[in-house]
Image (cartoon, coloured by chain):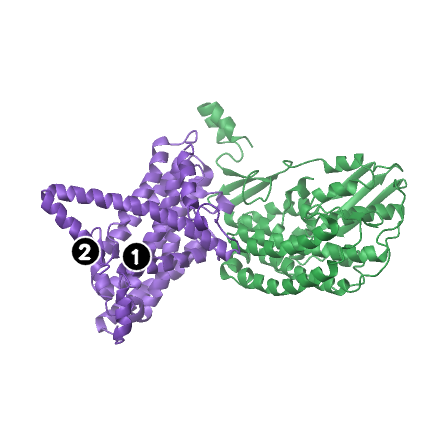
Amino acid sequence: MWSLSNISSAIHNWLNQTFNPTWAMIIEMFIAGIAVIGLFALLGLVLVLMERRVAAWMQIRLGPNRVGPFGLLQSAADTVKLLVKEGMTPNGADKFLFNLAPFIAMMVAMLLMAPIAFAKDFQLWNLNIGVLYVTAVSSIMVVSILMAGWASNNKYSLMGAMRSGAQIVSYELSAGLSILTIVVFTGSLNIADIINAQSNGWWIFKGHIPVLISFVIFIVAVTAETNRAPFDLAEAESELTAGFHTEYSGMKFALFFLAEYINVFIVCAIGATLFLGGWMPFHIGHWKAFNQVMDYIPTSIWFFGKTFFLIFVIMWFRWTFPRLRIDQLLNLEWKYLLPISMFNLLLATAIAILGWHF
Amino acid sequence: MFRETEILKTGSQILPIKQNLEGAGDFVINVGPQHPATHGVLHLVITLNGETIKKVEPHLGYIHRSIEKMCERLNFRQFIYVTSRMDYLSAHINNHACAMCVEKGMQLEVPDRAQVIRVIMDELTRIASHELWWGAMAMDIGAFTPFFHAFREREKINEIMEETCGARLTMNYYVPGGLMSDLHPNFQKKVKEFITLFKLKIDEYDELVTGNIIFINRMKGVGILSKEDAVSYGCSGPAARGSSVSNDIRKLYPYAVYDKVQFDEILETGCDSLARYMVRIREMKQSIHIIEQLIDNIPEGEFQAKTKAVLKLPKGEFYSRVETARGELGVYIVSEGATTPYRIKFRSPGFSNLSALDKMARGSKLGDLVAMMGTLDLVIPDIDR
């Protein structure tokens, strides 16, 4: 029961019975596209509100609580405001690139949705190189930031974009290597396989120290990759006013803003999938009754619970830590995280070959 | 230097000449007058080489309200109130300097009660100012949360001020010869409550910010201002004491009852941003110490000396100096024997401290410039007046 796969397969069967297979597939693609866009809008609203509430909680404030019950409609109201605002293009800007950049940011975020398993058997595209796909596509994000910074014809934007370029390219290495640790343990790049391999325990519990290290490195690296504080040098508001999106307004700004939050969601979803078992319920050895109770909780709730826990951690960072300087940021990556994660990968490989993990 | 707009206007014709001009290929950005890092309308023209700063050129005057000229048109009772608007974060202390200068000229004896209350108020102001600085400092280097924590405690001081003086920012509580009104009956109780609370909170500040490894890395070894430079640029207050220049006016030229209370002059030898940060944090503890000594010993008596309705300073020149939260504030009055000053001049701490920024910032990264400005604790109306 509670399984989303029943619903999806029911729709699939009905479509195939009613239409011929080609039309059925086209209709399914439309349904999936609309579902992704809907999820996007919903996640954007929820995450923005969540960030503001978390920030308020850490800062002994109340946060938005006027629009709608508990301020739930606040971000909807903000979206309407941004939609009707004038989207200005500065004089001397490269108009084509300037307007293209936010859409690339959005497209990257949308593409990243494809291989994520939201619940048991509920995945848009069960790609056999899922993890590789995620790391590859997420690196296109830097193109949109560089584009926005260059096309804005603003020195602050340019500096923000340059910082961001250096930062994202560096931190992708650590993120990639820590993902590889799990790939080494599982022996597969397929996200469904990785989740299934965790049916008898999440990797963070059964992977010994290498997985713990790579989990920490992964969280640090993705925080940097998504330009979140303490690594938010690309937008560093006290130095560069708003960094690469200084000149953006209205919906074009909103797209960047939304893409940032969706990216946070996606990297946390990847983290939850790789290290915390995705939609796998929490099981303890031979406690049959306990395990059954855990199984009773829907898999989608497990997935979103883990993801939102990681999102909360990343928000916690943002509202606690001061920002690093650009040279310290690059030092941290090239002098500490990268050597550690390389060594860690070797250790993980040794453990995987010798079969020392549980 | 030529302006960027001129190049744009003249287009390609100027190109051959352009390369010979000084500063031609430089990457120049304007930080301010509207910029989140400058805490006001300060305009810094920064020449960059990538992320590294080659030159910082402060442009002043955006909030110049000619306070000195305004003071010359007001009489000796009135001009004190204008000075609350100079360094609005230490309004009490500014008023203290002006009131003292007038008292010196008229040779007024200020009652003991007024002297003690003035010192308590000054120290409360200093704590409030340093708290705001602490929050803004953390915000400059990217941590938002401390700002709200700092304001929570500052609010308590504002409440105390509001009860006694009726105002929260520009208090106008000091008059020549004493105070404008007596203390509110709740004053002592509230101040004691605040002290108990604040002693807990200052440790919390250390936990949240001072001990943070990112914070220490951002502050340590950047913005070096050597002792010689601090003296030659005329820095004062915590900015100079971070470079171990002993210049606390409360110790060197004691006024009011500062010679009767026990406190230490805080000196740090680091010469860097962290040293200046630590000076302020430790100064807050000293201020608490001073208030603790005085709060139970406020003498009874008059709060104001008997003065004439219209004050007239004798012909001559008068100078007084106090230690504000930012450094040494000097008030220089030239009187012709009339009811208004003939000329008045303020020596404001922020102006001299800002002048050292270029020296400190050269060769460091853009992100550090913001942190350095934070440690100088600039209040722009104090610089421009």
The chain to which mark 1 is attached is A
Which x, y percent locates residue B37? 55, 45
Q: Chain of mark 2?
A: A
Q: Which chain is purple?
A: A
Residue B112 placement, left or right of B50: right
Quarter of the image holding residue B33?
top right
Write down which chain is painted green: B
* Spot occupied by residue B139 in the image (x, y as percentages of width and height): 54, 51
Q: What is the three-letter code of the residue carrying label 1? A: Ile
- Residue under circle 1? A270
Tell me the element at label 2: helix
Q: As drawn, is B106 to the left or to the right of A242?
A: right
Q: Dot 2, crowdedness within 10 Å: few (<14), some or many (≥20)?
A: few
Q: Quadrant of residue A144?
A: top left
Residue A6: which numbered mark, if any?
2
Secondary structure under the numbered disc 1 in the rendered image: helix
Q: Compare residues A148 and A63 and report the one nearer the observer.
A: A63
Give above or below for A285 relative to B61: below
Judge by depth and name the residue closer to the eye, A39 or B378.
A39
Q: Quadrant of the C terminus of chain B?
A: top right
Please say whether residue A286 is visible from this viewpoint: yes
Residue B253 is situated, as x and y percent measured from the top left of the image, at 79, 55
Relative side of B160 to B315, left or right:
left
Q: Does B138 sit above or below residue B197?
A: above
